[in-house]
Structures are given as structure tokens and as C-alpha cells.
């Protein structure tokens, strides 16, 4: 499974190029990961730094302005701790311990938004493949949502899945 995941990331790394650069409108809506959304093991700052190094290398020379900020004060939403957030080209990770999928989850939000807006045709096909898999797997749950909510939830489920898969690599 590790080799399979690494191969996926190698493919993403090779096709992540964007056709336009410096356009921030693609990812203005802030995405959050709340504590209840994940039950994976907790990780401290040291492991978060290793994850940051890996994903920064993946995006190097591919997404200008991409940034991961660790140890951020993110607060709470409806009384629940925010573990991570993503908007524009930045993934922000909460101060203290977070879950092992938090950083990959937030980075995935940045990547999917950039790929959808500016990715190469091959990158967009890869994104659609992931979304199709989510639609198939969660067909029953997604069918209960309005079309607008369904699309938003498809992306959230894709990013959650990518975050979880990254922890298995």
C-alpha cells in the first residue's frame, strides 16, 4: 500500500503544473478540519515538520506562493477545536497536537482547488478520477444532499480520503 501511495504522489508531482500562476481567486473559500472529523492518532510538531517538508517539496516550482504554516492559533468553530484550515495557497495547522491526517488534508484542499482551476488536462483527469471514486463510494450519502452541497461534500470527502491515505504511506 505504501508503494502504491508513493506512486500516486509521484504522478501528482509530475503533472501538478499549473497553466496560469499568481491567480489567488481560485481558493478564496476557507476550508476547515474540525476535531470531530478525524479520529486518527495525534501528532506533535516534530512530525508535522516532516509532513510539511514532504508536501513543500511536492509543490516546489509547481504552485507559486504555496505555503504551510504550523503552530497557528485557529480557535474554535461552534465550540469545537479547529485542527487545520486552507485558503488561497496556504494550509494552516493548529498549535499543539493535531491528527496525523490534518496537514495532508489541508494541503489536499489547496492542491485540488489549484488543479481544478489551473491544472493541466492530465491533472484535471486525475482529479476527476478521485471525485468519481468518491461519488461511487459515497453514492447513498451524497444522494441526500442538494446539488450545491453535494459538490462541496464530494471535495471534502476526497480531501479527507487523501489525508487518510497519506498517513498510510
Image: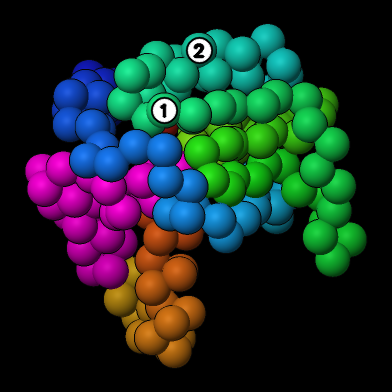
Q: Quadrant of the N terminus?
A: top left
- The mark found on residue 132 in the picture is none
The location of residue 139, given as percent across then percent down, is 30, 76
Q: Which of the two discs, 1 and 2, sits closer to the camera?
A: 1
- The mark found on residue 53 in the picture is 2
Instruction: Specify whether residue 105 is in view.
Output: no
Q: Quadrant of the C terminus?
A: top left
Q: Residue at x 46, y 43 (%)?
A: 110
**As rendered, which of 44 and 116 lies closer to the eye?**
116
**As rendered, which of 25 and 39 lies closer to the eye?**
25
Q: Which image quadrant is residue 26 in?
A: bottom left
The residue at which mark 1 appears reads as 64
On whether residue 50 falls in the magenta region, the answer is no
On whether residue 132 falls in the magenta region, the answer is yes
User: How many neighbours does mark 1 have within 10 angstroms: few (below 14), some (14-19), or many (20 or more)?
Assistant: few
Q: Which image quadrant is residue 108 in?
A: top left
The location of residue 149, given as percent across then percent down, is 48, 79
Vertical placement of residue 94 versus 30, above or below: above
Question: How did the renderer colour the structure?
Answer: rainbow
Q: Residue at x 50, y 12 (%)?
A: 53
Q: CA distance from mark 1 to mark 2?
A: 16 Å
The location of residue 56, given as percent across then percent down, is 46, 19
Vertical placement of residue 159 versus 53, above or below: below
| Label 1 secondary element | loop
| Label 2 secondary element | helix
The location of residue 24, given as percent across then percent down, is 48, 47
Q: Residue at x 72, y 42 (%)?
A: 83
Q: Is residue 114 left or right of residue 30?
A: left
**As rendered, which of 1 and 108 lies closer to the eye?**
108
Vertical placement of residue 10 versus 41, above or below: above
Residue extent of the magenta highlight? 108-136
Amino acid at each position: 500500500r505504501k508503494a502504491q501511495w508513493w506512486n500516486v504522489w509521484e504522478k501528482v508531482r509530475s503533472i501538478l503544473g499549473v497553466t496560469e500562476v499568481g491567480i489567488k481567486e481560485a481558493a478564496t473559500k476557507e476550508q476547515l478540519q474540525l476535531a470531530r472529523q478525524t479520529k486518527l492518532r495525534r501528532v506533535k510538531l516534530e512530525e508535522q515538520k516532516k509532513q510539511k517538508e514532504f508536501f513543500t517539496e511536492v509543490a516546489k516550482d509547481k504552485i507559486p506562493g504555496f505555503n504551510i504554516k504550523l503552530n497557528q492559533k485557529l480557535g474554535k468553530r461552534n465550540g469545537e477545536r479547529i485542527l487545520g484550515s486552507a485558503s488561497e495557497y496556504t494550509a494552516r495547522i493548529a498549535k499543539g497536537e493535531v491528527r496525523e491526517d490534518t496537514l495532508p488534508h489541508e494541503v489536499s484542499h489547496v492542491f485540488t482547488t489549484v488543479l481544478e482551476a489551473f491544472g493541466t488536462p492530465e491533472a484535471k483527469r486525475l482529479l476527476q478520477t478521485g471525485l468519481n471514486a468518491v461519488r461511487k463510494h459515497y453514492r447513498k450519502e451524497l444522494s441526500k444532499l442538494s446539488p450545491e452541497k453535494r459538490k462541496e461534500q464530494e471535495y471534502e470527502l476526497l480531501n479527507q480520503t487523501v489525508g487518510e491515505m497519506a498517513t498510510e504511506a
